[in-house]
Amino acid sequence: MALVGLLTLTGCNPPSENGSDTPVDGSPSTSSAPDEGASDELVESALYPGAWATPIEQALTPDQDRFEAVSESSALAVEQCMIERGFTRFVAKREARPIQRYYGVIDPDVARVWGYTAPSTAGEETDDPNAAPPMENAPLAEEDIALAGTDESRTEEVTLPDGTVVARYDPEACWNIGRLQVQPHLFEMVALQMQLENMLNNASMTVENSAEFREAYDEWAACVVDKGETNPPFPDGLYGTVSSSSGEVSAEEISEAVAHAECKGETGFLREWSQLRVEAEQELIAQTPGPLAEYVALAEETYSGGS
């Protein structure tokens, strides 16, 4: 769940080929959380055409329509809270659906136009429009305090089972009051999401250190060289680079991105990589099934309109 500007969350997901909330083929995703925990059956990924969906990927990617309905309801609740406090012109930002992205650029058609970026992000500012005002020496406006609170008022903590504090929030701030009316398990889900992302990252690192992955990677790298590109570095060559801040995409970047994308399909690297990730996640989930099962249950309750 995105807690932009109010909570400080950590994570180390691999770099993405774009920041849009559509799949790399440009079509809307209909992925939703599975009904139960991990399954041994391989499922086609709704986010990455040609890849297998991993259990955690499926859990952390809510259905687009259901997420938008919850996001809209939450924003309206935040606005009502602000109106009651006298800020009658306040308009809450609608949250974007969270998307976990891996594998770098995988669609040659996208790569031919945008290199490693995507239409929705190329040339845009990187600052998040939902971010709360920076905590500088200048006093915060009353509206900002009513919405987000202050450093001192963020007294509630979101913690992991080991006691690690992953976020702090102001329980009297409208941003939290409004969203908790619609998503009563919001902060429980934040803590569970952090655990799942840690498991996901651990699985990814295990995969990328495996002999099976290295063999598939070497075949992909050789394919890229055969297409006239230099041997891509590891791991940057997997995920690609981002265009310059000007938003301009160079011919060299496009050529490299196309070669990377084509070879991920032609060599079967994407299939192999995603299957290894599925297996690694399943192993971790089998050892610690609680976080996934609990997150899926709370997500279903949230997105189905339960309370």
Image (cartoon, grey):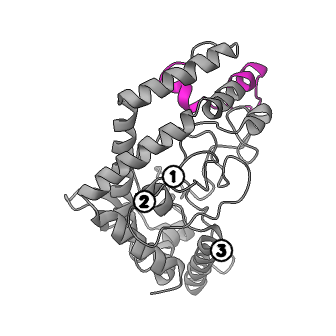
Tag of residue 256: none
Is residue 185 positioned above or below 152 on the image?
below
Task: Find residue 241 and report its image quarter.
Answer: top right
Which of labels 1 and 2 is toward the front?
Answer: 2
Percent of width and height locating residue 228? 70, 12
Is residue 163 positioned above or below 233 on the image?
below
Residue 244 seen by the camera:
no
In this orientation, which residue lies closer to the viewer: 120 or 230?
Answer: 230
| Residue 94: in magenta span | no
* Amino acid type, residue under disc 3 in the picture: Phe
**On-image quarter of the C terminus:** bottom left
Residue position marked by numbered label 3 in the rendering: 90
Residue position marked by numbered label 2 in the rendering: 7
Q: Reading the chain from its start, which is encountered first: label 3 or label 2?
A: 2
* Amino acid type, residue under disc 2 in the picture: Leu
Percent of width and height locating residue 258? 72, 28
In this orientation, which residue lies closer to the viewer: 32 or 144?
Answer: 32
Residue at 41 percent across and 71 percent down: it is 36
Q: What stretch is highlighted in magenta?
A: 232-256
Q: Reading the chain from its start, which is encountered first: label 1 or label 2?
A: 2
Which of labels 3 and 2 is toward the front?
Answer: 2
Left or right relative to 182: residue 246: right
Is residue 241 positioned above or below 179 on the image?
above
Tell me the distance, in whole angstroms, between the alpha carbons under discs 3 and 1.
19 Å
Q: Reading the chain from its start, which is encountered first: label 3 or label 1?
A: 3
Magenta highlight: main SS: loop
Find out whether the residues at labels 1 and 2 contact each other: C-beta distance under 8 Å. no
Percent of width and height locating residue 128? 60, 51
Residue position marked by numbered label 1 in the rendering: 134
| Residue 245: in magenta span | yes
* Amino acid type, residue under disc 1 in the picture: Pro
Residue at 48 percent across and 84 percent down: it is 181
